[in-house]
Image: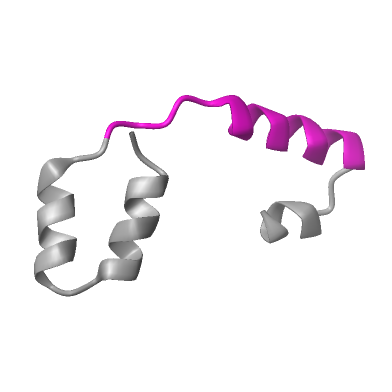
Amino acid sequence: MLGLAAADLPEHAVAAIAHSLATEQLPPAEPLVEVLLDTVGQHELLELYLRTHR
């Protein structure tokens, strides 16, 4: 979000974009991605992936 906030946009535009992003449905998690990230030991990335996917 820092990139969006640092963009040369009016504050109300940034707020509108942030609101739109916050209300979007999360995409489904792909089981293969979960297995691959776990297999290669990328547990922090896996946790982030699971928090950002349903």
Give left or right: position of 14 versus 50: right
Whether 19 is among the magenta residues is: yes
* Residue 36 to residue 31: above or below: below
Residue 5 location, quadrant: bottom right
Rendering coords of residue 6 (x, y %): 79, 60
Residue 16 location, quadrant: top right
* Residue 17 to residue 39: above or below: above
- Nearer-the-camera pick, 16 or 53: 53
Give left or right: position of 47 versus 24: left
Q: Residue at x 35, y 39 (%)?
A: 53
Residue 31 location, quadrant: top left
Give left or right: position of 40 versus 52: left
Colouring chosen for the image of the structure: one colour
* Residue 44 to residue 48: above or below: below
Q: Which residues are magenta?
A: 11-28
Q: Residue at x 59, y 25 (%)?
A: 23
Whether 4 is among the magenta residues is: no
Q: Residue at x 84, y 45 (%)?
A: 9
Most common SS among magenta residues: helix
Give left or right: position of 38 versus 27: left
Q: How many marks?
A: 0
Q: Residue at x 25, y 39 (%)?
A: 29
Rendering coords of residue 54 (x, y %): 33, 33
Rendering coords of residue 46 (x, y %): 28, 59
